[in-house]
Image (cartoon, rainbow, N blue to C red):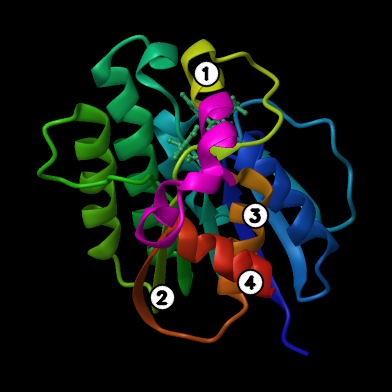
C-alpha cells in the first residue's frame, strides 16, 4: 500500500479541521504536517505542527516537503479589516505556499476556493479567488484540484451574522436547488474535506475544478 505525506494550511479552520482528522485517521498517510499561526491542541503520532509566520513562509522551505498539499486557508474582508489584508491571505499566502511546495517536490495541490471564483469578476472577493486559482494553475504540480464550494455548512466557533442568515436560508430552501441549481446548494465542510481526501487518493493528473454539486457527489461516493 502506498503511503503519502500531507501538508495542510488552514487546519484550524472549519474545513481544515475536518480534513486534518480524516488525514490523521487514514492509513495511506504516514505523516501530516500542518502550518499554523498558533499550535492546535491536538497530539497524534502522525502529526507534525509547524508554527509559521505566513509573511515569511520561505524561511520554512526545508520543512515544506510533502506529496499532497491541502490548502484550506482563507479569511473574510470583514475579518481581515481591508481588501488589501484579505488579498494578502487569500492570494499571496496561498500562491506563495503553492510556489514553495511545488519547488519542494509536491505532486498535488488541492485548494478550497469558492463558488463564483473568476479573475474577471466585478466582485472583489470572487476576483481574488479567481486570480488565486489562475496563479495556482501556473505551478508545476502533476495534479491541481480546485474545489469551489457554495456556502459552507458546519459548526463554526466564531459567529458570522450574515453567513448565519445565509446558512438558515440555504438549509430552508435547499430542496428547491435541484438539477442545474444543485451547485448553489450549501455543503457541509465535512463533505468538502471528504471529497478532498478522496480526490487526493485517486490517481490522476492535470487541473480539475469541482463545483459544489460535484464535491457532494465525490463525498457521497467515497
Ligand atoms: N465560509 C463559506 O461559506 C465559504 C464558502 C465558499 C468558500 N469558502 C472558502 O473556503 C476556504 C475555507 O473556508 P473555511 O470557512 O473552512 O475557513 P475558516 O474556518 O475561516 O478557516 C480559515 C483558516 O485560514 C487561516 N487564516 C485566516 N487568516 C489567516 C492569516 N492572516 N494568517 C494565517 N492563517 C490565516 C485560519 O487560521 P487560524 O486557525 O489561525 O485562525 C484558519 O485555519 C476559504 O478560502 C474560504 O474563503 C468559504
Looking at the rendered structure, the secondary structure element under dot 3 is: helix
Depth order, front residue of 55/114: 114
Identify the residue under disc 1: 165
Q: Residues within 10 Å of mark 1 (few under 14, many from 20)?
A: few
**Which of pointers 1 and 3 lies earlier in the amino acid sequence?**
1
Identify the residue under disc 3: 191
What separation in Å lies between label 1 and label 2 (alpha carbons)?
36 Å
Left or right: 162 with respect to 154?
A: left
Depth order, front residue of 34/81: 81
Q: Position of residue 20 (x, y in %)?
A: 72, 50
Ligand 1: does it lie within 8 Å of the C-beta at label 2? no
**Which of pointers 4 and 3 lies earlier in the amino acid sequence?**
3
Residue 32, labelled with which disc? none
Q: Residues within 10 Å of mark 3 (few under 14, many from 20)?
A: many
Left or right: 124 with respect to 1?
A: left
What separation in Å lies between label 3 and label 2 (alpha carbons)?
21 Å
What separation in Å lies between label 4 and label 1 (alpha carbons)?
31 Å
The segment highlighted magenta reads 167-187
Identify the residue under disc 4: 198
Quarter of the image containing the N terminus?
A: bottom right
Left or right: 116 with respect to 160?
A: left
Looking at the rendered structure, the secondary structure element under dot 2 is: strand
Label 3 or label 2, whichever lies nearer to me, is 3
Q: Taking 21 as reference, is 164 above or below it?
A: above
**Which of pointers 1 and 2 lies earlier in the amino acid sequence?**
2
Label 1 or label 3, whichever lies nearer to me, is 1
Q: Residues within 10 Å of mark 2 (few under 14, many from 20)?
A: many
Residues under numbered marks 4 and 1 in contact, where contact means CB atoms less than 8 Å apart: no
Amino acid at each position: 500500500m502506498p503511503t503519502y505525506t500531507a501538508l495542510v494550511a488552514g487546519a484550524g479552520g472549519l474545513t481544515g479541521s475536518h480534513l486534518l482528522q480524516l488525514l490523521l485517521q487514514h492509513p495511506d498517510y504516514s505523516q501530516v504536517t500542518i502550518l499554523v499561526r498558533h499550535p492546535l491542541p491536538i497530539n497524534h503520532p502522525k502529526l507534525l505542527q509547524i508554527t509559521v509566520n505566513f509573511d515569511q513562509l520561505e524561511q520554512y522551505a526545508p520543512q515544506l516537503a510533502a506529496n499532497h498539499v491541502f490548502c484550506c486557508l482563507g479569511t473574510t474582508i470583514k475579518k481581515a479589516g481591508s481588501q488589501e489584508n484579505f488579498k494578502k491571505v487569500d492570494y499571496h499566502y496561498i500562491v506563495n505556499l503553492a510556489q514553495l511546495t511545488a519547488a519542494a517536490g509536491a505532486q498535488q495541490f488541492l485548494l478550497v476556493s469558492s463558488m463564483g471564483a473568476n479573475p474577471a469578476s466585478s466582485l472583489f472577493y470572487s476576483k481574488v479567488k479567481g486570480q488565486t486559482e489562475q496563479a495556482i494553475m501556473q505551478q508545476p504540480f502533476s495534479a491541481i484540484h480546485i474545489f469551489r464550494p457554495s456556502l459552507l455548512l458546519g459548526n463554526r466557533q466564531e459567529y458570522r451574522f450574515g453567513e448565519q442568515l445565509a446558512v438558515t436560508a440555504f438549509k430552508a430552501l435547499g430542496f428547491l436547488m435541484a438539477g442545474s441549481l444543485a451547485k448553489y446548494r450549501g455543503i457541509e465542510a465535512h463533505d468538502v474535506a471528504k471529497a478532498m481526501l478522496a480526490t487526493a487518493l485517486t490517481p490522476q493528473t492535470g487541473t480539475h475544478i469541482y463545483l459544489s454539486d460535484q464535491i457532494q457527489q465525490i463525498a457521497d461516493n467515497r
